[in-house]
Amino acid sequence: MRMLKPALTALAIAIMAAPALAQVPKAADGKPDLTGFWTNASLTPLQRAAANKTLVVSEMEAKKIADGTAVAGIPADDPEFNKNARYSDPTKGAPPKGGKDFGVKGYDSFWVTPGTMLAHVKGEYRTSNIVDPPSGQLPFVDPAGQARKGMLGFQRYATGNAPYEGPEETAISERCLIGFGQTGGPGMLSVLYNNNYQMVQTPTHMMILVEMAHDTRIVPIFPTAEKARASHRPATFKPWLGDTVGWWEGDTFVMETINVNPLQAENQAFPLSEQGVVTERFTRTSDKDIFYEFSVTDPVNYTQPWKAELAFYPSPGLYEYACHEGNYGMHGILAGAREKERQAAAVKTKGKSVKGGQ
């Protein structure tokens, strides 16, 4: 016993000297409190770049990758795009006729706030949000088809050249109907700017207000997963951001989303079919961190279920997001398309006249 006493004393001293365990704020009902302003801004993409071979990198490697990361398609070494660049400088003049960077350089660096570092998740710097499959890639059923679709979408954004036969041709992000790039979920990703969120938690509902486009998710909370799933609305209802229900699993808040509006589901950061199910999990690990993970099951688009992990950090608040260019500018957009059609028809008619005269 005498031999044990010094050891026990040393152990007690070590415990007292160790850092205090992270304190997780609690709501009035005893659940971890997710209420607050948060951000998930980071330069970590959904899929891992080919140059990055591992999911986890050191802080030094993370800084090197972040410094070399292209933003909105603009290479990091672009001489114009840096913290001092101002594309909207009124003295700069108009861009060259036929330029290919209509959308890419439509913003100067003042507006671009995707974060400055890779995501720091569970104490690790990550090179992709996707953790399963280990490749960090979306396990598409048709990878070549999805690549072509993605390229067409980027060309539309970069050049402004696209079909505009009617209002239906304009993308939902152009009309600011919902935020672009999956910022509002299901599966909430960091995008080019406006990566702030407000969460308000009650015993019966979780509200997530997204800064971009002010998308709002109001999620009813049920006692069990079974009761939550039984409370999904009929499949005929396909709202923006989908039909979401929630429940608690211990200290983790879980949300399940189905029936995302097809106009969103087919054109978001990762496509979803009518069979798609997205399950999101929020675990508050400290007063300054929420561990966020989501998994996707969709046998139409993916060869296997896949999973992504991110983190939310405290944010000072939300900013007003004003975006109506695609609505107020609808007349001009469609009028411009009709003018291009008239010009093309005139050229065609002139060609026929010349040929007939010969």
Image: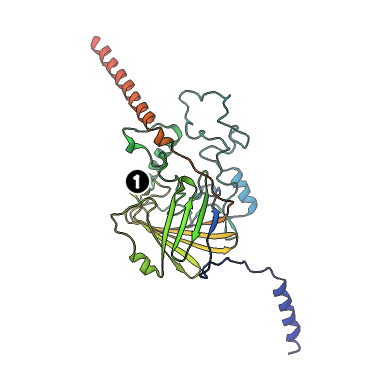
Q: Which residue is mark 1?
A: 263
Q: Quadrant of residue 286?
A: bottom right
Q: Quadrant of the C terminus?
A: top left
Left or right: 282 in relation to 286: left
Where disc 1 sits, the SS reads: helix
Q: Residues within 10 Å of mark 1 (few under 14, many from 20)?
A: few
What's the residue at 49%, 70% (across, down)? 250
**Foreground residue, 150 or 344?**
344
Q: Quadrant of the N terminus?
A: bottom right
What's the residue at 39%, 68% (across, down)? 225
Q: How is the image coloured?
A: rainbow
Residue 220 is situated, as x and y percent measured from the top left of the image, at 41, 62
What's the residue at 58%, 35% (across, down)? 81
Residue 124 is situated, as x and y percent measured from the top left of the image, at 59, 58
In the orientation shown, which residue stands out farthest toward the left? 356
Q: Is residue 235 above or below residue 225?
A: above
Residue 94 is situated, as x and y percent measured from the top left of the image, at 52, 24
Residue 67 is situated, as x and y percent measured from the top left of the image, at 61, 44
Left or right: 335 in relation to 195: left
What's the residue at 51%, 38% (across, down)? 73
In the orientation shown, which residue stands out farthest toward the top? 358
Q: Quadrant of residue 297?
A: bottom left
Q: Is residue 282 visible?
A: yes
Could you tell me how many numbered marks the image carries?
1
Q: Is residue 54 visible?
A: no
**Foreground residue, 227 or 263?**
227
Kind of residue indicated by mark 1:
Leu
**Foreground residue, 253 or 125?**
253
Q: Quadrant of residue 235?
A: bottom left
